Image: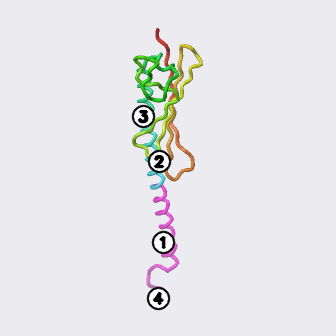
Amino acid sequence: MKWRLKKGFVLIEVLLATAIASFAICGILFMYIAATDLIKTSKNASIATSAAQGLIEEIRNTSFNCLIAPCCSGVPCPAKAGCDFCYNHLGFLVNGIPSGRGVVYFDNTKPDLLKITVSVSWRQPGRAIDSTVELVTQVANRY
């Protein structure tokens, strides 16, 4: 009868406490991994947005006549004197994102208004589909 007077833990109580603690630790680790993945996605989205914005600013500083000229792919255009580059479906790489690729689309259906879409996409590790950032601007012909 003296053994009932001793206070202590039973093996089942210890196993149950260990199971509950392991579930809590697994939940915390899962949240840490998910947060790390979101940080990487946010970083890549920031780099992609910055690259797209920089290219849009470069395009907006280019003469309207140079933008609407159908010419070569990313080299000085001999047909248009004074134009540095031609931007007709120009593809580019994004520094800072290993699998980052960008494309510039031009819509010149209106004669004095040019719609420019810069799309940057990259493959996030562990995901099946690409992540994409797309910026759209319009450039008007200022006579």
Residue 51, which numbered label?
A: 3
Q: Which residue position holds label 4?
A: 3
Q: Who comes first in sequence, dot 2 or dot 4?
A: 4
Give the mark toward the camera: 2 or 4.
Answer: 2
Q: Amino acid at mark 4?
A: Trp
For the residue pair 32 and 125, the one nearer the viewer reads as 125
| Residue 9 counted in the magenta span | yes
Q: Which of labels 4 and 3 is toward the front?
A: 3
Residue that numbered label 2 is attached to: 38
Residue that label 1 marks: 18
Q: Is residue 70 above or below residue 8?
A: above
Do residues under tags 1 and 3 come within 8 Å of each other at their CB atoms? no
Query: Disc 4 to disc 1, how far (Cα)?
Result: 25 Å
Provide the residue span drawn in magenta: 3-31
> Dot 2 lies on which element?
helix
What is the C-alpha distance between the residues marked 2 and 4? 55 Å
